[in-house]
Image: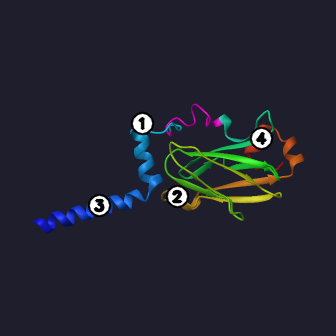
Protein backbone atom coordinates (compact mmCIF):
# COMPACT_ATOMS: atom_id res chain seq x y z
CA UNK A 1 0.00 0.00 0.00
CA UNK A 2 2.83 2.35 0.86
CA UNK A 3 4.41 1.84 -2.59
CA UNK A 4 1.11 2.70 -4.29
CA UNK A 5 0.78 5.96 -2.36
CA UNK A 6 4.39 6.85 -3.15
CA UNK A 7 3.86 6.06 -6.83
CA UNK A 8 0.67 8.17 -6.95
CA UNK A 9 2.44 11.08 -5.24
CA UNK A 10 5.39 10.83 -7.66
CA UNK A 11 3.05 10.78 -10.69
CA UNK A 12 1.13 13.77 -9.32
CA UNK A 13 4.34 15.74 -8.84
CA UNK A 14 5.55 14.79 -12.32
CA UNK A 15 2.23 15.90 -13.82
CA UNK A 16 2.38 19.22 -11.99
CA UNK A 17 5.99 19.75 -13.09
CA UNK A 18 5.03 19.15 -16.74
CA UNK A 19 2.04 21.48 -16.53
CA UNK A 20 4.15 24.22 -14.95
CA UNK A 21 6.39 24.28 -18.04
CA UNK A 22 3.39 25.38 -20.12
CA UNK A 23 3.12 28.86 -18.58
CA UNK A 24 1.00 30.43 -21.34
CA UNK A 25 -1.32 27.44 -21.63
CA UNK A 26 -1.84 26.60 -17.96
CA UNK A 27 -0.51 29.10 -15.44
CA UNK A 28 -1.63 32.30 -17.15
CA UNK A 29 -5.24 31.20 -17.85
CA UNK A 30 -5.56 29.88 -14.28
CA UNK A 31 -4.15 33.18 -12.98
CA UNK A 32 -6.70 35.15 -15.03
CA UNK A 33 -9.55 32.83 -13.97
CA UNK A 34 -8.88 33.64 -10.33
CA UNK A 35 -8.88 37.39 -11.00
CA UNK A 36 -5.20 38.04 -11.67
CA UNK A 37 -3.99 40.36 -14.38
CA UNK A 38 -5.84 43.20 -16.03
CA UNK A 39 -5.68 42.21 -19.67
CA UNK A 40 -8.52 42.24 -22.16
CA UNK A 41 -11.38 39.79 -21.79
CA UNK A 42 -11.08 37.31 -24.69
CA UNK A 43 -14.88 37.02 -24.88
CA UNK A 44 -15.50 40.75 -25.52
CA UNK A 45 -12.37 41.71 -27.50
CA UNK A 46 -14.30 42.76 -30.61
CA UNK A 47 -16.93 44.72 -28.69
CA UNK A 48 -15.08 47.17 -26.46
CA UNK A 49 -11.68 48.56 -25.56
CA UNK A 50 -8.44 48.74 -27.49
CA UNK A 51 -9.11 45.73 -29.71
CA UNK A 52 -12.54 46.74 -31.01
CA UNK A 53 -12.68 45.82 -34.69
CA UNK A 54 -12.56 49.40 -36.01
CA UNK A 55 -9.28 49.97 -34.09
CA UNK A 56 -7.38 47.01 -35.59
CA UNK A 57 -4.57 47.34 -38.12
CA UNK A 58 -1.97 50.09 -38.52
CA UNK A 59 -2.74 53.45 -36.90
CA UNK A 60 -0.66 56.59 -36.51
CA UNK A 61 -0.95 58.61 -33.32
CA UNK A 62 -0.70 62.43 -33.31
CA UNK A 63 3.04 62.24 -32.50
CA UNK A 64 3.62 60.14 -35.64
CA UNK A 65 4.31 56.80 -33.91
CA UNK A 66 2.84 53.77 -35.67
CA UNK A 67 0.98 51.06 -33.77
CA UNK A 68 -0.42 47.84 -35.22
CA UNK A 69 -3.18 46.11 -33.23
CA UNK A 70 -4.09 42.51 -34.02
CA UNK A 71 -6.17 39.67 -32.65
CA UNK A 72 -5.23 36.03 -33.17
CA UNK A 73 -8.02 33.48 -33.04
CA UNK A 74 -8.54 30.01 -34.41
CA UNK A 75 -7.61 29.98 -37.30
CA UNK A 76 -7.05 33.54 -38.48
CA UNK A 77 -5.20 36.76 -37.68
CA UNK A 78 -7.42 39.87 -37.65
CA UNK A 79 -6.70 41.82 -39.73
CA UNK A 80 -5.30 39.23 -42.06
CA UNK A 81 -3.13 41.70 -43.93
CA UNK A 82 -1.40 44.85 -42.66
CA UNK A 83 0.45 47.61 -44.50
CA UNK A 84 3.33 49.46 -42.75
CA UNK A 85 6.05 51.84 -43.95
CA UNK A 86 9.66 50.80 -44.44
CA UNK A 87 12.35 52.10 -42.10
CA UNK A 88 9.92 53.16 -39.37
CA UNK A 89 9.67 51.53 -35.91
CA UNK A 90 6.30 49.79 -35.71
CA UNK A 91 4.85 48.85 -32.33
CA UNK A 92 2.84 45.63 -32.51
CA UNK A 93 0.18 44.95 -29.86
CA UNK A 94 -1.51 41.57 -30.13
CA UNK A 95 -3.82 39.42 -28.04
CA UNK A 96 -5.71 36.18 -28.52
CA UNK A 97 -9.40 35.40 -28.38
CA UNK A 98 -9.04 31.70 -27.64
CA UNK A 99 -5.66 29.95 -27.47
CA UNK A 100 -1.94 30.71 -27.54
CA UNK A 101 -0.72 31.65 -31.02
CA UNK A 102 2.71 32.76 -32.24
CA UNK A 103 3.06 34.94 -35.27
CA UNK A 104 6.37 35.12 -37.07
CA UNK A 105 7.38 37.27 -40.01
CA UNK A 106 9.03 34.92 -42.51
CA UNK A 107 12.43 36.16 -43.67
CA UNK A 108 13.09 37.97 -40.37
CA UNK A 109 13.94 37.02 -36.80
CA UNK A 110 10.80 38.78 -35.58
CA UNK A 111 8.07 36.92 -33.73
CA UNK A 112 5.38 37.62 -31.14
CA UNK A 113 3.18 35.39 -29.01
CA UNK A 114 -0.54 36.10 -28.60
CA UNK A 115 -1.98 34.96 -25.27
CA UNK A 116 -5.65 35.07 -24.19
CA UNK A 117 -6.25 37.73 -21.54
CA UNK A 118 -2.89 39.44 -22.07
CA UNK A 119 -1.46 41.94 -24.54
CA UNK A 120 1.93 41.13 -26.06
CA UNK A 121 3.93 44.07 -27.35
CA UNK A 122 7.09 44.43 -29.42
CA UNK A 123 8.59 47.04 -31.73
CA UNK A 124 10.03 46.00 -35.08
CA UNK A 125 11.55 47.99 -37.95
CA UNK A 126 11.38 46.61 -41.48
CA UNK A 127 14.30 48.09 -43.42
CA UNK A 128 12.96 47.80 -46.95
CA UNK A 129 9.72 47.32 -48.86
CA UNK A 130 8.47 43.79 -49.42
CA UNK A 131 5.91 41.18 -48.44
CA UNK A 132 6.24 39.03 -45.35
CA UNK A 133 4.07 35.98 -44.76
CA UNK A 134 2.85 35.57 -41.18
CA UNK A 135 2.26 31.92 -40.23
CA UNK A 136 1.19 30.79 -36.78
CA UNK A 137 4.05 28.87 -35.13
CA UNK A 138 2.19 27.63 -32.05
CA UNK A 139 -0.07 24.62 -32.61
CA UNK A 140 -3.60 25.93 -31.99
CA UNK A 141 -5.87 23.17 -33.25
CA UNK A 142 -6.91 21.23 -36.32
CA UNK A 143 -6.88 24.25 -38.66
CA UNK A 144 -3.48 25.50 -37.47
CA UNK A 145 -1.80 24.69 -40.78
CA UNK A 146 -4.04 27.25 -42.57
CA UNK A 147 -3.55 30.11 -40.10
CA UNK A 148 -1.73 32.71 -42.17
CA UNK A 149 -1.48 36.47 -42.42
CA UNK A 150 0.55 38.91 -44.46
CA UNK A 151 2.53 42.07 -43.80
CA UNK A 152 3.14 44.42 -46.69
CA UNK A 153 5.96 46.92 -46.19
CA UNK A 154 5.73 49.91 -48.54
CA UNK A 155 7.81 53.07 -49.04
CA UNK A 156 7.17 55.83 -46.47
CA UNK A 157 5.75 58.25 -49.03
CA UNK A 158 3.36 55.60 -50.37
CA UNK A 159 2.19 54.77 -46.83
CA UNK A 160 1.52 58.45 -46.09
CA UNK A 161 -0.95 58.63 -49.00
CA UNK A 162 -2.96 55.57 -47.91
CA UNK A 163 -6.32 56.18 -46.21
CA UNK A 164 -6.55 54.43 -42.80
CA UNK A 165 -8.92 51.76 -44.18
CA UNK A 166 -6.39 50.68 -46.80
CA UNK A 167 -3.73 50.10 -44.13
CA UNK A 168 -5.63 46.94 -43.11
CA UNK A 169 -5.82 45.42 -46.57
CA UNK A 170 -3.36 44.14 -49.15
CA UNK A 171 -5.80 44.62 -52.01
CA UNK A 172 -4.12 45.92 -55.18
CA UNK A 173 -3.93 49.72 -55.15
Give the structural element (helix, strand or loop) at label 1. Answer: loop
Disc 4 from disc 1: Cα separation: 33 Å
Q: Are marks 2 and 1 in contact (CB under 8 Å)?
A: no
Asked where in the image residue 21 lies, by quadrant, the reply is bottom left
User: Which sits in the foreground, 117 or 166?
Assistant: 117
User: Which sits in the foreground, 15 or 43?
Assistant: 15
- Number of callouts: 4
Question: Can the viewer see residue 127?
Answer: yes
Q: Residue furthest right?
A: 157
Q: Nearer the viewer, mark 3 or mark 4?
A: 3
Mark 3 or mark 2, which has the lower sequence index?
A: 3
Q: Which mark is residue 35?
A: 1
Give the structural element (helix, strand or loop) at label 3. Answer: helix
Disc 1 from disc 3: Cα separation: 25 Å
User: Which sits in the foreground, 169 or 110?
Assistant: 110
Q: Which mark is residue 13?
A: 3
**What percent of the width, then of the height, locates residue 152?**
77, 54
The residue that mark 4 highlights is 65
Instruction: Sort mark 1 into few (<14), some (14-19) or many (20+) by Cα contacts within 10 Å.
Output: few
Q: Residue furthest left?
A: 1
Mark 2 or mark 1, which has the lower sequence index?
A: 1
Write the start and end of the magenta stretch as one range.
Answer: 42-53
Q: Measuring 53% from the left and 48% from the top, which residue is drawn there?
A: 115
Mark 4 or mark 1, which has the lower sequence index?
A: 1
Amino acid sequence: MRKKVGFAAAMTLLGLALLSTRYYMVDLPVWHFFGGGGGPDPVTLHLQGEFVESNLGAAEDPAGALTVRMIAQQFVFVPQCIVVPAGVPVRFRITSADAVHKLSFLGTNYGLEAVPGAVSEATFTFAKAGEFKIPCYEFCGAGHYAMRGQLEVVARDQFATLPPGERRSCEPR
